[in-house]
Image (tube, rainbow, N blue to C red):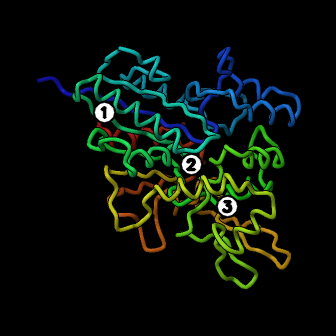
Amino acid sequence: MSSPATVVILAPGTMGSSLLDRAQFEEIWPDRTVNARTQDEKLKLVTRTDLIPGQPIKKVDWELACVYEELIRRFEKSGFTYYGSISEFGSNKDHKVFLGFAYDWRADNAIAAEVLAGNIDAIYEKYSGQVDIWIVAHSMGGLVSRNVLEMPKIDTSRVKGLITLGTPHLGAPKALGCILGQIAEMPFHADTLKKLANTDGYPSTFELLPPDVRPFVKDAGGADVNIWSGTGLNLLINQGASVANIVAAEAFLKTLHDDPNEEPPVPYYLVAGVDEETVTGYTLDSSNTFNVEIQKVGDGTVPDWSALFHTVNGPKKGTTQISVNNVEHTALVKRQIVFDKIKEIIGF
């Protein structure tokens, strides 16, 4: 009897999927957006409502971008055939497949999860069940994947395991700085990123915030401030946070099971970069300004306690924690040491 096929699905992080004009299939993100001359032009392009997902982004023109060319190349060198989308995969039934899953990274991650669930079912049925399906998820892609598995939106026995690379399982405090206009991310200035994050209907940045089980803001007296309710929520709204996006994000985060004693539906393998300076929280001063706190406890974007799913009561059961030193967030999908971990877990 022949061995089952192996299909590994790549779920990119935020900004890691191209976005295309629905009518002409022209690439608006990142191509046209990055090359636009002004920040206003960039914002107008990236907030268009007629964009659809293309494929995981392979290459762009700035260094610290979430691009997947090297990861794809390493899978191909290991005997996998790469397809950038489920439609490109088509009716092919290769024995070893690395499959890109692009999604609209601006929108509610629950929408992407519905599509990912459909892809998993389609793959399983294509191979008549004779297939081992794995998900390799970078950053926010891990939250999309967890929604599929923890709701659940599929028969979870169809998935062998989830490997996350720098996923903010317990949130990324840096996201709050983006929402408040304190932090810039190429190719956007801080004020442009704030406008994008607070555009109604695009709540994904809010879905990167730590849930209420992991406080990350303290008042001037050192007491925890819950940004999801009461005074903390009012402070966010008063500083321009989108109420619609807050509501959507809170609903999405409630679909993720953060109880450390509740085992996940499939094995979770959690890869985290450590020892890079990373935003870990905020302190409110007397004027209620959010002052950022930075420590060398993460990959520069996601704290290690979040990527390793280490709650205040300990690590989540049913997970395997893997730390890699001095690997920055976007480099998690580029470094050989991380790929070697993936190979070891999947077994190819």
Instruction: Work out whether mark 3 precedes mark 2 in sequence or the reverse, and give the earlier one.
Output: 3
Q: Amino acid at mark 3?
A: Val
Residue located beneath label 3 in the image: 279
Q: In the displayed image of the protein, which residue is found farthest to the bottom?
A: 221
- Give the x, y percent position of residue 180: 78, 57
Callout 1 secondary element: loop
Q: Is residue 32 above or below residue 137?
A: above
Residue at screen point 63% across, 63% down: 296
Callout 2 secondary element: loop
Q: Neighbour class for label 1 at 10 Å: few (<14), some, many (≥20)?
A: few
Callout 3 secondary element: strand
- Give the x, y percent position of residue 146: 43, 49
Residue located beneath label 2 in the image: 327
Q: Neighbour class for label 3 at 10 Å: few (<14), some, many (≥20)?
A: many
Q: Amino acid at mark 1?
A: Phe
Q: Which mark is residue 348?
A: 1
Alpha-carbon span between mark 3 and mark 2 = 16 Å
Q: Is residue 121 above or below residue 257?
A: above
> Which quadrant: the C terminus?
top left
- Please state if 71 lies on the left or on the right of 15 as rendered: left
Q: Amino acid at mark 2?
A: Val
Instruction: Work out whether mark 3 precedes mark 1 in sequence or the reverse, and give the earlier one.
Output: 3
Residue at screen point 40% across, 16% down: 90
- Give the x, y percent position of residue 247: 62, 56
Give the number of the mark in front: 3 or 1. 3
- Give the x, y percent position of residue 58: 59, 26
Instruction: Work out whether mark 1 precedes mark 2 in sequence or the reverse, and give the earlier one.
Output: 2
Q: Quadrant of residue 122?
A: top left
- Please state if 87 lies on the left or on the right of 298 as rendered: left
Residue at screen point 40% across, 39% down: 135
Residue at screen point 76% across, 24% down: 32
